[in-house]
Amino acid sequence: MTFSTDTVRQAETVLLVDDEDNILRMLAQYLERKGYRTLQAVSGADALHIVAESAPAAIISDVCMPEMDGLDLLHAVMESDPDTVVILTTGSPSLDVTIEALRSGAVDFLPKPIDLNRLLESLHRGIRRRRARLAGRRRQSELEKQVRLRTRELSEALSGLQEAHRRLQDSYQESIDLLCRTSAVRDRDTGDHIDRIRVFSGEIARTLGLPAEEASVIAAASPMHDIGKIGIPDEILRKPGPLTTEEFEIMKTHTTIGARILSGREADVFRISETIALTHHEQWNGFGYPHGLFGEEIPLCGRIVAVVDVFDALIHERCYKPAYRLEDAIEVMQGMRGTKFDPAVLDAFLVSLPAIRTHLADREAAGLNGSGVYETVP
């Protein structure tokens, strides 16, 4: 089998561990001809010293060695650097040992005499995966650096706004709208979405019997729920198809990014908006994010916005789906009662539907609803 030496073996270092000198020499000669650098150790203890000093990309180790065997070496290496590629070999393979090795992080477990083609293939595959993981971490680190920068810039901007907010109470909503619409532009969303979230949240809060002032603050704060998307890269935020697992993990960070952007503000509306940004993707059954909160561990404002955010997303077209008919959207949401949604909040939403439908109809008549479907529910 032929392997690419240009993209995989750019002077990567492989540590060879075996108490038989002839095997060490044979493997070293073979791998060095294939473009690798090699180091050698005759015991697990010697190998750990070399790992500490040289951090090899890969280790090929015999299992049966005195004092520290290959499995013990594997466990120690995985604990210190789980990205290390480890391949174990043995002259007397057993199913139990093979399973233990693979479960513990080995990329392959080879019987002796060693099939050099299979060894090279496993080494090649392992190093490619290692490089991909390390590159992913570098990208994540750079992303976090950019997010910190943007968060700091926004935090400084919000700090300047805070003093003005204390002096002029009526400037709160204007500032919130500006931030939300800035975020919505990047998300290919509209200001109409922000207005609907505000209205729907206020209706549910009042239906739940919250004091008028508290309901008003929740309504005013609710449009800030997705402000953290300003820290999500465009290629993820605007991707027309499904996100990969890695992309979705990055997308989920918009909750914590938003909370950081909004943290440290004295005004109630910003404190509530911070809570909403952080918790509006938590689920009643504990399977939400970012913290997996369960039931009433989720603040009520977050539970309210979770309902209205899903409802508005369902009845409006998105880059990844068409708009649902109103009755279909309600049926979907009723199916999430007690799992995704707090039953009491969902019931309050259903009670509020006449007012919500009236609001949607009025906005549609004025041409303000964007791309949505608003057939009347019987």
Image: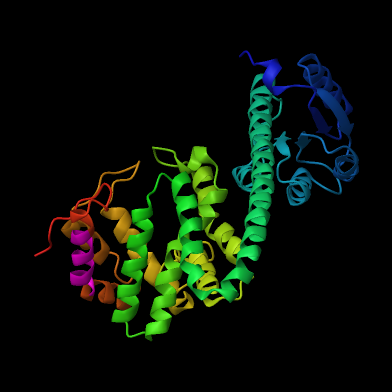
Q: Is residue 194 left or right of residue 138?
A: left
Can you give x and y, in whole percent of width and height, for residue 209 in the image? 32, 85
Outermost residue on the front side: it is 168
In the rendered view, would you say 221 is above or below 10? below
- On whether residue 358 falls in the magenta region, the answer is yes
Colour setting: rainbow
Q: Is residue 49 left or right of residue 330?
A: right
Can you give x and y, in whole percent of width and height, for residue 263 in the image? 61, 67
Q: Is residue 193 left or right of residue 10?
A: left
Q: 350 or 282: which is nearer to us?
A: 350
Count of numbered labels shown in the rendering: 0
Query: Residue 240 occupies which quadrant of the picture?
Result: top left
Chain part drawn in magenta:
352-362
Name the quadrant of the C terminus: bottom left
Q: 32 or 253: which is nearer to us?
A: 253
Can you give x and y, in whole percent of width and height, for residue 107 in the image? 64, 37
In the rendered view, would you say 376 is above or below 275? above
- On whether residue 199 falls in the magenta region, the answer is no
Answer yes or no: is residue 173 visible: yes
Answer yes or no: is residue 339 visible: no
Q: Residue at x 52, y 70 (%)?
A: 275
Can you give x and y, in whole percent of width and height, for residue 276 in the image? 48, 68
Q: 56 or 263: which is nearer to us?
A: 263
Tell me the chief SS of the magenta region.
helix
Q: Residue at x 38, y 58 (%)?
A: 194
Query: Residue 203 occupies which quadrant of the picture?
Result: bottom left
Q: Is residue 191 left or right of residue 165?
A: left
In the rendered view, would you say 2 is above or below 307? above
Name the quadrant of the N terminus: top right
